[in-house]
Amino acid sequence: MKNSSFPDTPALEDDFAPHDDADWHAAAEKLLKGAPFEKVLLTRTPEDITLQPLYSRDNASGSTPPETLPGFFPFLRGRTASGYHGRPWLVLQALPFARPEAFNAALLHALANGQNAVLLQLPDGHENGTHIATIGDLATALQGVELTAVPLYLQAGHATPALLDLLLALLREKEIAADTISGGLFYDPIASALVAVNPAAALEARLGAHADFLLSVHEKLPDFHTIFIDTRPWHNAGGSAVQELAFGLAAAVSTLGALLQRGMAIDDSAGRVHMRFAVDSRFFMQIAKLRAARILFARALQAFGGAEATQRFFLHACSSRWNKTVFDPHVNLLRSTAEAQAAVLAGCDSLSISAFDELVREPNDFSTRLARNLHSILREESHLDRVIDAAGGAWAVEKITRELAEKAWALFQQTEKSGGLLAALRDGWPQQQVIEKAAQRRQAIDRRTVPFIGTTVYANMQENPLPDAGEAQATEPLTPRPRQQETIDRLLHTGEAKPVAQEQRIAAALAGARIEELLGAISGQAAGQPGSISPLPQIRAVEHFEALRTAVRKYKQTGHELVPVFRAVFGSLAEYKARADFIADFFATVEFPVLPAEPCGDAQQTAQAAQASGATVVVVCASDARYPELVPEFMHHFKKTGARARVFVAGAENETLASTGIDGFIHRRSDAAALLRALLQETGVLA
């Protein structure tokens, strides 16, 4: 075989014997030296997908139909045929500054330095946001922004319709036609009910009222993505990618179904759908998740009878909150980098990257600039916008995408057979499935088989808390607008049980009505009805480790000190170093001080040194070959010293060693959270 470009040069493969997967498998097993291939090289994910160490044409065949192209059904390879050429993803950064003036200053700076869309979010009990109460606050927040040139997205939970009233009033005041602005509403009543801090109206009533609301705004805002499906509650509760996809699709079907019941054609509604997915740092799984989402939506819309042009949705990706940490927060920047790259490679249409310090303080110009510049690096330096579907054809990505789509479709069908998502949520089984999955994931984290850098492994014991960031430079606040109380009372307090018409609400907003008054006029009597579903706890993966470490810091601030851990090391440096280092890292998770690992002599001398150190925890570190003789001898001498410390052996469980009187074993599958919590309770750090 000859190279067509260089006819006199033989093909490189002619110099090597052909090999297949079986040859590679045999070679890999040989290098493992007897260790089981399945345990060492195969990885089971929370999605119950087994990751292979090597993907090839043989084990990934059939994953991608050969005729699949970007912009065509089932939109696996992207929503449009041209990818990001001429249509880069929207840089939709959240700016969680509390004061409208601070938000405005940060927004104008961001728009001048790479951001090309506006996200205005109000605080909701789970996320920080900007306090917007009146049209004056909104005018301050958006002062200097050309609203007809920059897409605007609003996020305010159940108050989103009232915030939209304020926006429509502001547009009217500025004489800007509503049909000339673009953007969308980040409001999903199902998702909001799942994370509600306070009881909400019955979910069916909420969804029905939301469908009526959507019908009323579609004509006013033809370029707005108004039908929003938020899968973050499933993700940030610890759910798997399969659960995010399945229950997110079920929510989309429920919302579209409510609109169809009200006479809206499927092709008119489907084109307004946008979905938000949180992306964590499991790189290939997250690329596959976003690609699978497009397949699933296209398949569902095809079943609805929607035209191919509407069988695609606008995909918004954002940084995961589940995997972010309070300690060593700069690591969050590294996580967000991997997440952003995965989202772009998967073909997201808009992207929000969290500031690395958002969990510990109000982000400042430094942290928001770093997050915003990640977009620019991916586009301007990495050129990820130049190649359409850069991940397409990678065997691993294609195989995982297919497996995710199949599993999620099966769970979606199960949800529909149970009567749909609303009925399932009333019964509580989707919530219970996610809670159980989160518990499984937490168990792996507790045992440190799933590491969190800077928190459960490689913790920095000398870390100092981040200083308060301070707000971005603020503009002078505008003079408060006068409130026309009589006009507001006349427009909103009509005495009617039904919601007040939007035109009256807009007029009331222009007169100075507050957002809670507008919301009351929208909700009517339904707002006080009790919630109909169990909420889904929003947690972070390692917040329980952080709680232990925070307790230790508070303990130290009262003048107390933790007694150091003593490592009883034996043999040569090569015999004990790996285990001694492992133990130091294990206890650093909660800032337990660990004494230097220095040989003290034989078992008797080491036992005496351990007793003299005053340590309440002693860990024996040596090779497996030494343990059978060493541990009984050490325990014999240690008991004679009268020391009351707890003694552990660094290594796997062993019944013979357990009978010597040790308190346990510390190894790579130990429940670190439980053991460290118990030790902190014994030392008086935890009540």
Image: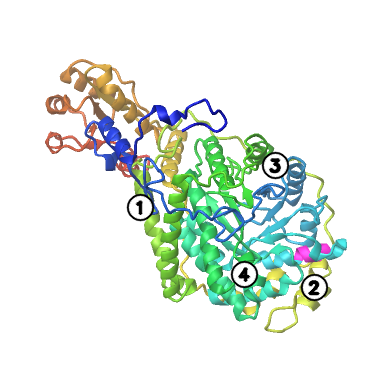
Secondary structure mostly taken by the magenta-highlighted segment of the chain: helix
Which residue position holds label 3? 471
The quarter of the picture where residue 113 lies is top right
Q: Nearer the viewer, residue 523 or 628?
A: 628
Dot 1 or dot 2: first in sequence order is 1
- CA separation in Å, label 1 and label 4: 41 Å
- CA separation in Å, label 3 and label 4: 48 Å
Q: Nearer the viewer, residue 271 or 202?
A: 271
Magenta region: which residues? Answer: 166-171
Q: Is residue 687 visible?
A: no
In-image side of 565 versus 654 (left or right): right
Q: Residue 61 appears at what percent x and percent y?
A: 41, 50
- CA separation in Å, label 1 and label 2: 53 Å
- How is the structure coloured here? rainbow
**Which residue is at 55% across, 35% downward?**
330
Dot 2 or dot 4: first in sequence order is 4
Does 500 sit above or below residue 543?
A: below
Dot 3 or dot 1: first in sequence order is 1
Dot 2 lies on which element?
Answer: helix
Residue type, mark 3 in image: Glu
**Which residue is at 46% across, 38% downward?**
554
Which residue position holds label 2? 488
- CA separation in Å, label 3 and label 1: 39 Å
Which residue position holds label 1? 440
The quarter of the picture where residue 620 lies is top left
Q: Residue 87 appears at what percent x and percent y?
A: 70, 50
Dot 4 lies on which element?
Answer: loop
